[in-house]
Image (cartoon, rainbow, N blue to C red):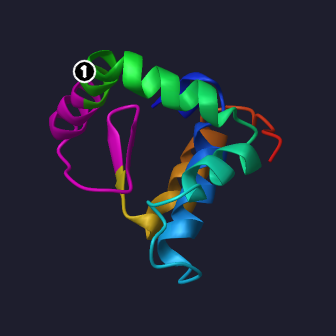
């Protein structure tokens, strides 16, 4: 959440997802793996760690509100995206979601990685 609020959520998600599922390490959550992922995503790990520690309750409330919105959209689990009252559940529907965004005239925002 803190990474998303800094405009680097997708970049951080990509880095952490790679840590978790690449098989390159079994202890992705220990040591400095997450800090290094933050740096690769263009974030300051000290800033992220401080925000998570100091604003834990606020961040948890934002995540809970997102979960409520997800349930209201009729889906549970990830990856799940809702847009314009339409749910796109599962990684196999991400292309359909992109297609729908294009249909609605949304312009792609380039995010440096």
SS state under label 1: helix
Identify the residue at horizontal 55%, vertical 46% (top origin): 100
Residue 107: percent from left, percent from top: 74, 33
The correct choice, above or below, for 20 with respect to 99 in the image is below
Identify the residue at horizontal 63%, vertical 36% (top origin): 45
The correct choice, above or below, for 68 with respect to 58 in the image is below
Q: Which residue is mark 1?
A: 61
Residue 91: percent from left, percent from top: 45, 66
Q: Quadrant of the image for the N terminus?
A: top left
The correct choice, above or below, for 31 with respect to 7 in the image is below
Query: Where on the picture, by quarter, is residue 48?
Result: top right
Residue 13: percent from left, percent from top: 55, 51
Say whether residue 87 is left or right of residue 112. Answer: left
Specify start and end residues of the magenta stretch as a single range.
Answer: 64-87
Say whether residue 80 is left or right of residue 76. Answer: right
| Magenta residue check for 70 | yes
The correct choice, above or below, for 5 with respect to 15 in the image is above
Residue situated furthest front in the rendering: 31
Say whether residue 68 is left or right of residue 84. Answer: left
Identify the residue at horizontal 32%, vertical 23% (top origin): 56
Residue 37: percent from left, percent from top: 65, 53
* Nearest the eye: 106 or 27: 27
Say whether residue 34 is left or right of residue 67. Answer: right
Identify the residue at horizontal 27%, vertical 27% (top origin): 60
Total count of labels: 1
Query: Where on the picture, by quarter, is residue 104?
Result: top right
Q: Give the class, few, some or many, for how many residues have Cα within 10 Å of label 1's Cα (few <14, many ≥20).
A: few
């Amino acid at each position: 959440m803190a990474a998303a609020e800094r405009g680097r959520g997708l970049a951080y998600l990509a880095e952490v997802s790679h840590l978790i599922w690449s098989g390159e390490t079994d202890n992705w959550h220990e040591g400095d793996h997450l800090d290094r992922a933050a740096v690769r995503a263009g974030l300051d790990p000290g800033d992220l760690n401080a925000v998570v520690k100091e604003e834990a309750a606020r961040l948890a409330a934002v995540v809970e509100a997102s979960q409520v919105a997800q349930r209201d959209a009729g889906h549970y689990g990830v990856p799940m995206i809702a847009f314009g009252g339409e749910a796109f559940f599962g990684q196999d529907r991400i292309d359909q979601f992109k297609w729908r965004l294009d249909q609605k005239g949304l312009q792609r925002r380039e995010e440096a990685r």
